[in-house]
Amino acid sequence: MCGRCLKKPPRWQYLHARWRYDFPLDHALLAAKYHHQFALYRWAVATLTAWPFAATERVTLVPVPLAPDRLAERGYNQATLIAQELAHRFRGADGAPALSVDANAALRIRETAVQQRLNWVERRRNVRGAFAATRSFTGEAVVLIDDVLTTGATLNELARVLTAAGAAQVDALVLARVLPIRRRERSNAFGRAVS
């Protein structure tokens, strides 16, 4: 657990990241996200040998929603495709809960700037109030699904919304996680100490 998470714990209970976001996986994930290379999602999910979360009878997979304009432009939500692969992979598997995908459980209720160009503080501010739950989650175990976790701001805000809607447990699964830049690396990159 990083110092930032110790100081201000995330809203989810457990995060499972399959890999570090680094070459060559970073290129493959971009190809899947923007160029329809969906076989990567099937392969990535197939590498999971077991359900990575605590045993629960039923789990709802909630993909991070896209803004309607981005969904219309792209034609698909990569997080929904990953969630569907997970539900298919673990259907009837020993020790796995019954998984259902609810792609309409949460909505992005306002347009946000593209996160790639924002720093950690800007990302958190950018997604604040961007999501709404469409139903009650009272007593449900939920796993949020996305392709890449950079700062966790999006998943954190979505976890906050679903917890407020009654979710008993909110976990998250991403295919890759961007490792935080260490202080020395920031100093070298920016030519000065950055806190």
Image (tube, rainbow, N blue to C red):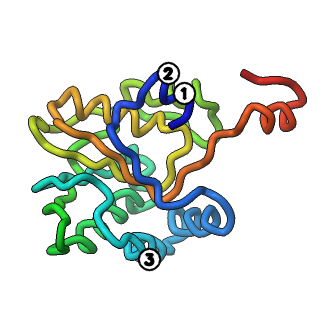
Q: Position of residue 37 (x, y in %)?
A: 50, 74
Please tell me whether residue 130 is drawn above or below residue 7 in the rendered image.
below
Answer yes or no: do the residues labelled 2 and 1 have beta carbons within 8 Å?
yes
* Residue underneath mark 3: 43
Question: What's under tag 1, amino acid-wise?
Answer: Arg
- Tag 1's secondary structure? helix
- Which mark is first along the chain, 2 or 3? 2
Dot 2 crowding, Cα within 10 Å, few <14, some 14–19, many 20+: few
* Residue underneath mark 2: 7
Q: Quadrant of the C terminus?
A: top right
Tell me the CA gap for discs 3 and 2.
36 Å
Q: 5 and 124: which one is in front?
A: 5
> Mark 1, mark 3: which one is toward the viewer?
1
Question: What's under tag 2, amino acid-wise?
Answer: Lys
Q: Quadrant of residue 158?
A: top left
- Tag 2's secondary structure? helix
Tell me the CA gap for discs 2 and 1.
5 Å
The residue depicted at 63 percent of the width and 40 percent of the height is: 180
* Residue underneath mark 1: 4
Q: Position of residue 185 (x, y in %)?
A: 79, 38
Answer yes or no: do the residues labelled 3 and 2 have beta carbons within 8 Å?
no
- Tag 3's secondary structure? helix
Question: What's under tag 3, amino acid-wise?
Answer: Trp
